[in-house]
Amino acid sequence: MNAPLRVAVLASGGGSNLQALIDYVVDEAAVAIVWVGSNRAVAGALARARSAGIEAMLIEDPSDGARMLTALRAARADLLVLAGYLKLVPPTVVHAFRGRVINVHPALLPAFGGDGMYGRHVHAAVLEHGAKLSGATVHFVDEHYDRGAIIAQWPVHVFENDSVDTLAARVLRVEHQLLPRVITAIAHGTVSLANDGRVIGNVPLPAFEELS
Ligand code: GRF
């Protein structure tokens, strides 16, 4: 039995993606969440980590790459997961963890990504453009952030009567399905980032015939 993939998570908000991951890995021996960091002392993510007995750290200076790298190395993290982390990951960390930082984005990148596209702004833009599908994307993080190589996506319908809140909730539900499956696939080695920046392999996902 190989040692589990040691996963560190950065989150700024409530941490529902973190919680979905905590709940999922209970039955997944190949993944262990070993560290959670947040730039907000009141972030629900830190409370959820503590409740699960996971080391939880307040990131007092999100731009201090050396300090973050020291914490990640002390936790012997293999993979860094951004689950609603609203600060830029310092380049020194991105470089040290090349091909080992992933992010979940609440839209089907490359659409509705990039500067200012986070949280409610994403869903408002989807509705404003009349898109018929939205969904979640998990991608590798490089220096350009939302432009990293896409690993997997999970689509949802956009309905005529959707509000930002109803669309956000539908997308969040599939984020909770997608992110743990991507991490598990990375842990099992069925998906990885090649040196030329392409994603190799795929993430086993259920058929989408019944879109939520
Ligand atoms: C999610 O919508 C995620 O896509 C975005 O930030 C939100 C995090 O939500 N990056 P939570 O803190 O995991 O509930």
Image (spheres, helix red, strand yellow):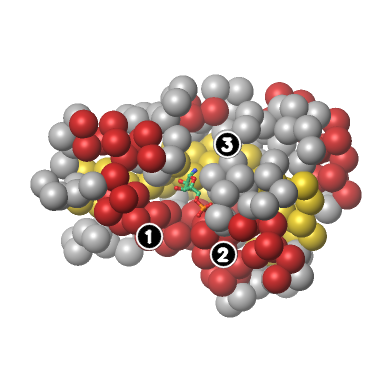
The label shown at residue 173 is 1
Dot 1 crowding, Cα within 10 Å, few <14, some 14–19, many 20+: some
Question: Which residue is depicted at the point 28% across and 31% down?
Answer: 125
Label 3 C-beta lies within 8 Å of the nearest ligand 1 atom: yes
Which three-letter amino acid code belongs to the residue tagged 1? Arg
Does residue 2 lie above or below 70 as drawn?
A: below
- Give the amino acid at mark 3: Leu
Are circles 1 and 2 on residues that touch, CB within 8 Å? no
The residue carrying mark 2 is: 19
Which of 77 and 44 lies nearest the eye of the viewer? 44
Foreground of the two, 171 or 108: 171
Picture residue at 61% right of the left edge, 75% below the top: 26
CA distance separating discs 1 and 2? 12 Å
- From mark 1 to mark 3, how far is it between C-alphas? 20 Å
Examine the image and state in which quarter residue 140 appears.
top right
What's the residue type where badge 2 is placed? Gln
Q: Residues within 10 Å of mark 3 (few under 14, many from 20)?
A: some
Q: Does mark 1's beta carbon lie closer than 8 Å to ligand 1?
A: no
> Is ligand 1 less than 8 Å from the beta carbon at label 2?
yes
Q: Which residue is mark 3?
A: 86
Task: Decide which of 201, 118 is in the foreground and name it.
Answer: 118
The image position of residue 75, as x and y in percent, is: 83, 53
Q: Earlier in the sequence, mark 1 or mark 3?
A: 3
Question: Residue 118: horizontal and vertical position, in percent?
Answer: 45, 35
Q: Is residue 72 above or below residue 35?
A: above
Q: Is residue 29 left or right of residue 84?
A: right
